[in-house]
Image (spheres, rainbow, N blue to C red):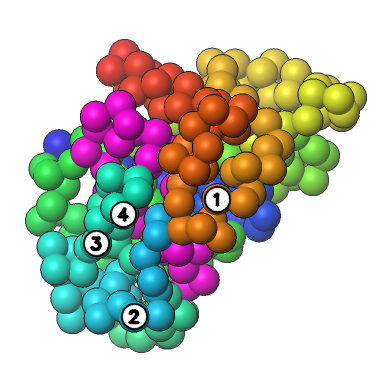
């Protein structure tokens, strides 16, 4: 059965989608069977995987509303060699339409039950807000991977997210837990980055992944070509860091 992880942070612009796409491609390189679910109406993970969001006939929107199944809506990232449940702007309307549905927080979990045995990992790219979409991701997941920048404001947002995870764990999904914190867009030349990094290690201990993702131009360029960064330039420091992170995640899960 697949391990299902949300890539989540209530703060925007912290590298959630970059992490989701490159971790999916990195795990695929390690011969893991991966499904990437794009739960953000912006559809950036869909585009980053090389899928045209404008031409979708079926997407995560239809799946959440019970109008389609993951088996027919999913597509394959040809460059990344993983499956994608894509999204586009249509998903923005799902928030309102799901209000009257039964078990609305568990729609994604119910849909995943039909395909989860086909994968080793399911990664869910969540929008940067505690919305019904994010809640569906958290209710479907076994754990949360939190990408964060090592800066002061990120620490404030982190405490809010951890509290949200505790609430969802207590009331909706007893399996949910924090798998780990991933330091992204890290610049070792900045003293603040080093200080915040040390604070994270001191406070969260082994919940902080050893892998650190540096600021990297090649990772930033890759989405415009519709290619994951680890495929776009495998020799770049950013790509190598995500491959190392994929290996660390597989090892961590095997040890649980």
Asked if 166 appears above or below 181 in the picture, the reply is below
Asked if 70 appears above or below 214 in the picture, the reply is below
Q: CA distance from mark 4 to mark 1?
A: 14 Å
Q: CA distance from mark 1 to mark 3?
A: 20 Å
Which residue is disc 3 drawn over?
75
Q: CA distance from mark 4 to mark 3?
A: 7 Å
Picture residue at 13% right of the left edge, 62% below the top? 71
Q: Earlier in the sequence, mark 2 or mark 4?
A: 2
Asked if 171 appears above or below 238 in the picture, the reply is below
Which residue is disc 1 drawn over?
222
Q: Are marks 1 and 2 in contact (CB under 8 Å)?
A: no
Judge depth for marks 1 and 3 and give the one in front. Answer: 1
Which residue is disc 4 drawn over?
77
Can residue 199 be seen?
Answer: no
Residue at disc 1, secondary structure: helix
Q: CA distance from mark 2 to mark 4?
A: 15 Å
Picture residue at 28% right of the left edge, 18% below the top? 254
Residue at disc 4, secondary structure: strand
Q: Position of residue 23 (x, y in %)?
A: 43, 38
Q: Earlier in the sequence, mark 1 or mark 3?
A: 3
Badge 3: residue crowd in 10 Å (few <14, some 14–19, many ≥20): many
Which one is nearer the viewer's eye here, 53 or 85? 53
Residue at disc 2, secondary structure: helix
Q: CA distance from mark 2 to mark 3?
A: 12 Å
Which residue is disc 2 drawn over?
55
Can residue 238 be seen?
Answer: yes
Residue 18 belongs to the span the image colors magenta: no
Magenta highlight range: 20-47
Badge 2: residue crowd in 10 Å (few <14, some 14–19, many ≥20): few
Q: Position of residue 58 (x, y in %)?
A: 24, 77
């Amino acid at each position: 059965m697949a391990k299902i992880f949300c890539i989540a942070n209530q703060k925007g612009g912290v590298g959630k989608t970059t992490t989701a796409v490159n971790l999916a491609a990195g795990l695929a390189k390690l011969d893991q069977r991966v499904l990437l679910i794009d739960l953000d109406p912006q559809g950036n993970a869909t585009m980053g995987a090389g899928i045209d969001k404008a031409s979708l006939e079926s997407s995560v929107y239809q799946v959440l509303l019970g109008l389609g199944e993951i088996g027919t809506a999913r597509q394959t990232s040809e460059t990344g060699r993983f499956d994608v449940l894509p999204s586009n702007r249509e998903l923005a309307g799902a928030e309102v339409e799901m209000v009257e549905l039964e078990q609305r927080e568990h729609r994604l979990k119910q849909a995943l039950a039909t395909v989860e045995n086909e994968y080793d990992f399911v990664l869910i790219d969540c929008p940067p807000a505690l919305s019904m979409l994010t809640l569906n991701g958290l209710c479907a997941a076994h754990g949360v991977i939190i990408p964060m920048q090592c800066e002061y404001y990120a620490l404030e947002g982190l405490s809010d997210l951890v509290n949200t995870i505790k609430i969802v764990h207590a009331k909706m999904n007893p399996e949910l837990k924090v798998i780990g914190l991933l330091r992204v867009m890290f610049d070792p030349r900045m003293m603040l980055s080093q200080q915040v990094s040390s604070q994270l290690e001191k406070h969260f201990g082994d919940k902080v992944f050893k892998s650190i993702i540096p600021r990297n131009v090649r990772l930033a360029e890759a989405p415009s070509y519709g290619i994951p960064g680890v495929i776009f330039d495998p020799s770049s420091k950013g790509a190598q860091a995500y491959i190392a992170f994929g290996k660390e995640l597989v090892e961590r899960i095997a040890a649980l």
